[in-house]
Image: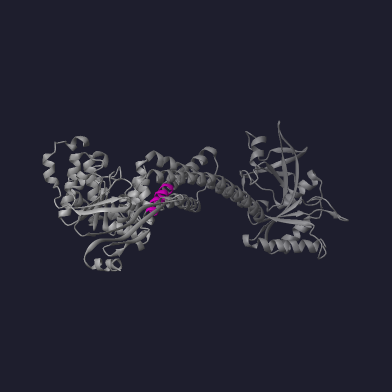
Amino acid sequence: MIHDLAPSLAGTNGSLIQIEHLTKVYQLGEVDVHALRGVSVNVSKGEFVAIMGASGSGKSTFMNILGCLDKPTKGSYLLEGIDVGKLSRDELAMIRNKKIGFVFQGFNLLSRTSALENVELPLFYGPTSNKIRKVKATEALERVGLGDRIHHYPNQLSGGQQQRVAIARSLVNDPSIILADEPTGNLDSRTSVEVMGIFQELNNNGITIILVTHEPDIAEFAKRHIVFRDGKIRADKVNSKPKIASEVIKDLPLIDDEEEAA
Amino acid sequence: MKILNIILSAFRALQRNKMRSFLTMLGIIIGVGAVIAMLAIGQGAEYSVKEQIAALGTNVLMVYPGAQQQAGVRSGAGSATTLTEDDALAISRECPAVQYISPGAFAGGQVIAGNLNWSTSIQGVGSDYLEIRQWLIEYGDFFTDQDIKAAAKVCILGRTVADNLFPDASPVDQTIRIRSVPFKVAGVLTKKGQNAMGQDQDDVILAPYTTVIRRLSHFPNLRFILVSATSLKDIAAAQTQISELLRMRHKIQQYDADDFTIRNQTDLAATATATTQVLTILLASIASVSLLVGGIGIMNIMLVSVTERTREIGIRMSIGARARDILTQFLIEALVLSLLGGITGIILGVVGSQVISSIAKWPTIITAFSIILSFGFSIAIGIFFGFYPARKAAMLNPIDALRYE
């Protein structure tokens, strides 16, 4: 009974994400794979959550459902009070466009398309006018420190810069949450910290960030840790003393990522 | 996503693979170009056939004697000897829809002038013949009614005959011998060129029909009567009037068959036009096959493109593209390919037709219809062959698409 009441209660208390008894079963041939076996979690606005776990723990499946790329088999997922499980394919696309910003391990930028155009892309699928689109995209790029490189192509940018373009793209539609799936997986340690610095800065400005990582070092920058194992949450604890990226970076040896770009 | 933005991004996507896009378009370019050129050739042929038939005089009727029938045994057409000079006179007297009439006879034979000779056909005609055929005398005079009455041994040479018998001198007032009968040349006809069947209409000698019957053919009756209706729309009336008159004159019972045949040029024109239309359709169908192959080329390349850009599709979906956005994007790309190909193909077809015209001396006609048809065809091909790949792209699962390597 408590769980039945939970969504409506949470819906009024300002929770951004309310997940109740989420299960996900994949059918691979005749075998049922239980990727998630009853996950319940709430995320409030302004949180910075790190989701951790070994591969096969179900964290990627969880991330896909969070990102409205996949639907749960059972259980409910409310995003800002909207029951995502009941939405159509097109409605899910709209939710992804308006409320979610994705950052991927492999950057996932369109090649042979300038940084600006990559960042503009989410706005193409909304009602934004051409003029406002350009302004918003430029602003988002300035926010991640790439104001001077808006016309560069991905292959003219370093890994760190590409990931910053991806972050700008995730930001440009003012989403409710940014979902970052191993955003530092392809980056060296210094650049990783720089990217985490950007996330921390965005979080300080009130943006909710959910980060999937298997690196404990990276998770240390988040304010809350959720650990997955075997499709269930094994630990959910507050990180009372998150590392501050701007301080960590001072202790790191200098590797100029401009060299890579050149 | 706004349609203009989709079109722009389609152009950009195609620009990224310039060579591939061009080769894909080439299929459509050749297909459309071939359709345009083939239609132009076919319609050109149709036009020139119509033109030549019109030059014969489209309000012309020809009356032939029918097949002779005796006790159920029928001989070939023209075997009856029923068409007489009196019939011709009666037609001109009693059929109001008839304007000109020329009785006709003919003979073939070797023609000798000085030390040159030539084999040609000798048409025996009446004094209205030139009016009916819309033909003119280039120099000299046509024979008179007096010449016809007297069966005078005068003749008019066609351009080809004149050139062959009198290469240097003027033939007028010279004497030629047709089958040993001496004829005085009264005039020379203007050049008329080939007829619809490719025969040289200038390879002819005209003489009074009376002379041909009495001096050359020795066939007592008329071989044909050439008639012109007062106007094009009176052809049917003239045909009915002649038919009724001849049936009456020949005392044919109500249910018996005619002993004559009336042919008009509109029948001939219709037949010839139908023939060339079949030719046009045939040529265009063959060309359409290459257009179809071009369309399959587009489908093939779009399928390759969808596979190559699976990740891009995944990215677009993850940031909010709906299935129909992806569908539209790929469909527009296919359409841009086929339309650009179509337009280029139309230009190629038009230029190609001109080249064919000037090199092969074939008449070609490009109509708005053939351009609209090919344009419409290329749009249809873009949609038809672009839809499957676009749908395939739109149906991709975003998670799988994002992971695609």
On the rendered image, what quadrant is the C terminus of chain B found in? Answer: top left
Q: Is residue B3 left or right of residue A129?
A: right
First to last magenta residue range = B326-338
Residue drawn at (30%, 64%) of the image: A82
Asked if the stretch drawn in magenta spans residue B327, the answer is yes
Left or right: B293, with B202 as reference point: left
- Residue B1 shows in the view: no
Q: Nearer the viewer, residue A6 or A213?
A: A6
Q: Nearer the viewer, residue A104 or B35?
A: A104
The relative height of residue A187 versus residue B101 in the rendered view (above or below) is above
Image-quadrant location for residue B172: top right
The structure residue drawn at horizontal position 50% and vertical position 43%, both measured from the top left corner, is B353
Q: How is the image coloured?
A: one colour
Residue A125, percent from left and from top: 31, 56
Q: Indicate whether residue A178 is drawn in magenta.
A: no
Q: Position of residue A123 (x, y in %)?
A: 27, 55
In-front residue for pair A238/A138: A238
Q: Is residue B130 left or right of residue A256?
A: right
Q: Residue at x 73, y 41 (%)?
A: B183
Q: How many marks?
A: 0
Work out whether residue A124 can be spotted. yes
Task: Using the image as rendered, state which of residue B224 and residue B209 is in the foreground.
Answer: B224
